[in-house]
Image (tube, rainbow, N blue to C red):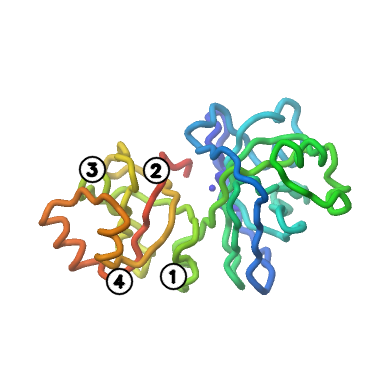
Amino acid sequence: MINIFNKTFRQRSNPRTMAAGLLLAASAMILPACAPAETSTPEEAAENTTMEDVASGAEGEIGKTVSVRSEVESTVGDSAFLLDDEMLFGGEDVLVINASGEPFVLVEGDDTEVQVTGEVQQLVIADIDRDYNLTLDPTLFVDYEDKPVIIAQSIALSPDPGDITSNPDAYYNKRIAVQGEVEDKLSASTFTLDEEELFGGDDLLVVANGMTPQTQDGEDVTVTGVLRPYIKADFERDYDLDWDLSVEEQIDAEYTEKPVFVADNVYPSAM
C-alpha cells in the first residue's frame, strides 16, 4: 500500500506486489511542511491511480487523488522526497511534496515504507508555493518542473509487521498506517487486528478516536493513526472510551504497557 497501495484503491487496477531493497538515509530525516492543508482521506478519493501512472505522466492523471505505498529513496530539500519505483517501472522516481502541515520523520536505519495520499499536479514551483504557502528552492526541482508530482496531504509511516516487532519503540507517537484483519470487536470503537507476526504474535488493539468504524469480524482493513503504549491513566485522560467494565478489565490485563494503535481513520484495505 513495492508492497503497494500503488497497488491502489482504483477499482479498475489489479494489485501488484514487489520487493524493494532501497536504503534510507543513515540518520532520521525530517520533512516539514510550511503550511497546513486540508487533509484528504483515501475514502474521499473518487478515483485513485498507480505509481506507474504517476511516473509515466499518463494522460489525464493530473488532478486525481492518489494513495500509494512505497519506500523513500531520498529527500529533496526540507519539504519533499522521492519514492523510487526503479524495480518495477523502469527507473522513474515519483516526487512527493509535503503539504500536510505536519513534519514527517523517517525511522533511522530502516527501509520502512510510507503511505502517501494527495493530488497529482504538474509541478510549477511558483504555483505550488502560492497555493500551499511553501518556499521551495527552485534549483532543487529543475529536473521535475512540469512533470507530475504528488502534493501530499497525508503522509504516514507504513511499516511491515516485522519492522514493528523488531523495534516497536521506533514507532511510538509517530503517524503510521497498518493493515490487518479484524479479529475481535470489543466495543463500538475498539477492536483487535489479527496478524500472527504483529507484535510478536499478539493481536494489535485498535482504539478508534472520535468515531465508530463500521468494521466486521474477518474484514481486512487499514488503520491510520498513532501507536502508543497502553497506560490506563493516559488513555482515560486523553480519550472518550466506551468500554464497559468487562472490556476495561480485559484490556488492563492483556495490554498494559503494550502497543495500542489509536486510529483516526479506518477503511477497507486494498490488499
Badge 2: residue crowd in 10 Å (few <14, some 14–19, many ≥20)? many
At label 2, the amino acid type is: Val
Q: Residues within 10 Å of mark 1 (few under 14, many from 20)?
A: some
At numbered mark 4, what does the secondary structure look like: helix, strand or loop? loop
Report the residue marked by disc 3: 188
Going 83% across and 45% down the picture, which residue do you hit? Answer: 144
Q: Which residue in the structure is indicated by mark 4? A: 257
Element type at mark 3:
loop
- Residue at which label 2 appears: 266
Do the numbered discs 2 and 4 sit on residues whose CB atoms are within 8 Å?
Answer: no
Say what amino acid the circle numbered 1 marks: Pro
Compared with residue 135, is residue 162 higher up or lower down, i.e. above or below? below
Upstream in the sequence, badge 2 or badge 4? 4
Nearest the camera: 31 or 25?
Answer: 31
Above or below, comparing residue 151 to residue 34 in the picture: above
| Residue 32 occupies quadrant | bottom right
In this rendering, does residue 6 appear at all? no
| Amino acid type, residue under disc 4 in the picture | Glu
Question: In screen coordinates, is 95 left or right of 71?
Answer: right
Residue 78 in view (yes/no): yes
The spot of residue 256 in percent (x, y) is: 25, 69
What amino acid is found at the position of numbered circle 3 in the picture?
A: Ala
Q: Earlier in the sequence, mark 2 or mark 3?
A: 3
Q: Residues within 10 Å of mark 4 (few under 14, many from 20)?
A: few
Q: Earlier in the sequence, mark 3 or mark 4?
A: 3
